[in-house]
């Protein structure tokens, strides 16, 4: 197993407000961007949380990919979003596609501030992985 795990915490998002509240619009954006980046959606699930203290709550969801997943969570009360993109590189290097997907979603949310992280995962063969755990 070998892959790339990207995360982004977005603050002060100035993109369309509907992209913080409307699960159908968020799902459509994510699906469109996944396809535009050449990744393969195989399923998805989106949930809108009930209002809290009279204020709308966020949306959480995921697009399952043949290559792994995209996950997203919104906090409309603070105009914040978290993104999580993981791709495995089993049949080819999908790293550039993952980076492009993350960049396109960040652009859609237009944050005032962002924190992005990148983690390379796996890369050890079975014997080396077993030894690394002991």
Image (spheres, rainbow, N blue to C red):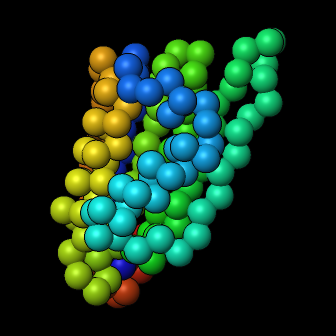
Horizontal side of residue 9 vs 49, given as left or right: left
Identified at 30% across, 62% down, the residue is 36
Which quadrant of the structure image shows residue 110? Answer: top left
Query: Does residue 10 appear in this view?
Result: no
Whether 126 is drawn above or below 8: the answer is below
In percent of width and height, residue 103 lies at: 25, 44
Q: Quadrant of the N terminus?
A: bottom left
Whether 87 is drawn above or below 21: the answer is below
In percent of width and height, residue 89 lies at: 29, 76
Q: Quadrant of the C terminus?
A: bottom left
Identified at 36% across, 66% down, the residue is 35
Whether 61 is drawn above or below 54: the answer is below
Identified at 56% across, 55% down, the residue is 62
Horizontal side of residue 120 vs 81, given as left or right: left
In percent of width and height, residue 5 lies at: 35, 56
In percent of width and height, residue 87 lies at: 36, 67
Query: Does residue 56 appear in this view?
Result: yes
The front one of 18 and 96 is 18
Q: Disc count in the image?
A: 0
Which quadrant of the structure image shows residue 106? Answer: top left
Which quadrant of the structure image shows residue 90? Answer: bottom left
Whether 83 is drawn above or below 46: the answer is above
Identified at 35% across, 87% down, the residue is 127
The front one of 10 and 46 is 46
Horizontal side of residue 99 vs 57, given as left or right: left
Horizontal side of residue 78 vs 48, given as left or right: left
């Amino acid at each position: 197993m070998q892959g790339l795990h990207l995360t982004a915490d977005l603050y002060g998002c100035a993109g369309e407000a509907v992209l913080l509240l409307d699960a159908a619009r968020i799902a459509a954006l994510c699906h469109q961007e996944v396809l535009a980046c050449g990744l393969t959606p195989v399923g998805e699930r989106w949930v809108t949380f009930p209002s809290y203290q009279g204020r709308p709550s966020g949306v959480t969801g995921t697009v399952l990919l043949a290559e792994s997943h995209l996950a997203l969570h919104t906090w409309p009360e603070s105009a914040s979003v978290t993104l999580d993109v993981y791709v495995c590189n089993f049949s080819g290097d999908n790293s550039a596609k993952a980076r492009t997907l993350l960049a396109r979603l960040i652009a859609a949310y237009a944050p005032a501030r962002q924190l992005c992280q990148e983690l390379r995962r796996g890369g050890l063969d079975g014997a080396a992985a077993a030894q690394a755990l002991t």
